[in-house]
Amino acid sequence: MSTTVEPLAPPEKEVNKDSFKGKIKPDWCAGCGDFAVLSCLQKALVELELEPHKVMIISGIGCSSNLPGYMNTYGMHTLHGRGLAVATGVKLGNHDLTVIATGGDGDGFGIGGNHFIHTMRRNIDITYIPMDNQIYGLTTGQISPTSAKGMKTKSTPHGSVENPINPIPLAMVAGATYVARGFSGKPKHLIVLIKGAITHKGFAFVDIFSPCVTYNKDNTYKWFTPRVKPLEDEDHDVTDFHKALDKAYLWGEEIPIGLFWRRTDLETLEEQEPVLDEGGPLGFRELGLTKEQSDELIQEML
């Protein structure tokens, strides 16, 4: 019995602006920043001339985690905080795929914080795009790991007593080799960051300010717009770790966005796995088992 799975044939139509648009329309609140992130991701994939059948987008749970359902690619909506774990398995199973993980700040930095750290230190070649709205939106407005201290929500009527995490320096010290921050209110800038992340060899992280217009009345478009300052407008060296770290800690009247840090001298996890060097993607290889052996294994697991 053959256990080889043949790859899908390439699409007949040429890739264009509609190639990555899914059949389902987004049901986010009107004005949600996630609309812009979805559009920017689709445009970035088109500009990179990638084909839908060679891309897989994986998410956890939350408003932003619905994104794979609005894309015309392979996709998977996983458990809360487990998107990066599944994305790792997908990349190791078929390292020819372009693998992108999406989610929110609660999903990625709270519930999935452990996976976030360890996926970065492994430097697996995937792109992670969390839509950071500083609130739990799907559950109608509670503080998240990135909510400001003192923020009043349904769960903190007297103001949050917790200090927020800053995912940019966290990503840098944990081992991410491409670390950037974007803003859904600056789509042209965001497309450049996403394209850079996808083409980067290694773990690429793009934290995106994506305002929740329904439940976060503090971190709004009006609040962000005068504060965000592209690093590209100044002489920022993306290879200087310590200066990038200093920039990452800036917050208040001036908040840097853009590419903070990039490192290209480290091998990815899949490049260091000898078993992946020969025979192509694991998902397309012969298992080396007879039907009797595979049936026996299945019975053991039942």
Image (tube, helix red, strand yellow):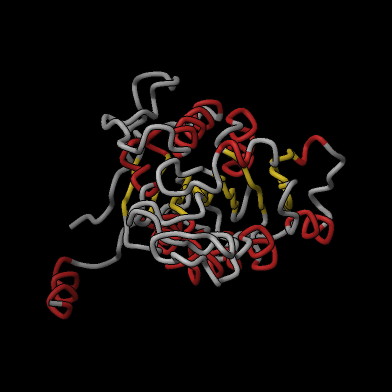
State the count of labels: 0
**Spot occupied by residue 199 in the image (x, y as percentages of width and height):** 60, 41
Q: Is residue 93 visible?
A: no
Q: Is residue 218 above or below residue 243?
A: above
Rendering quarter of residue 27: top left
Rendering quarter of residue 240: bottom right
Q: Is residue 139 above or below residue 40?
A: below
Q: Is residue 272 above or below residue 254?
A: below
Q: Is residue 267 above or below residue 210?
A: below
Q: Nearer the viewer, residue 243 or 266?
A: 243
**In the rendered view, does 230 fall on the left or right side of 19?**
right
Which quadrant would the C terminus be assigned to in this image? bottom left
**Spot occupied by residue 260 in the image (x, y as percentages of width and height):** 73, 50
Q: Residue furthest bottom?
A: 300
**In the rendered view, does 133 fall on the left or right side of 282?**
right
**Spot occupied by residue 223 in the image (x, y as percentages of width and height):** 61, 41
Q: Residue at x 66, y 48 (%)?
A: 180
Which quadrant would the N terminus be assigned to in this image? bottom left
Q: Residue at x 74, y 47 (%)?
A: 253
**Spot occupied by residue 136 in the image (x, y as percentages of width and height):** 41, 56
Q: Residue at x 57, y 33 (%)?
A: 185
Q: Residue at x 84, y 38 (%)?
A: 234
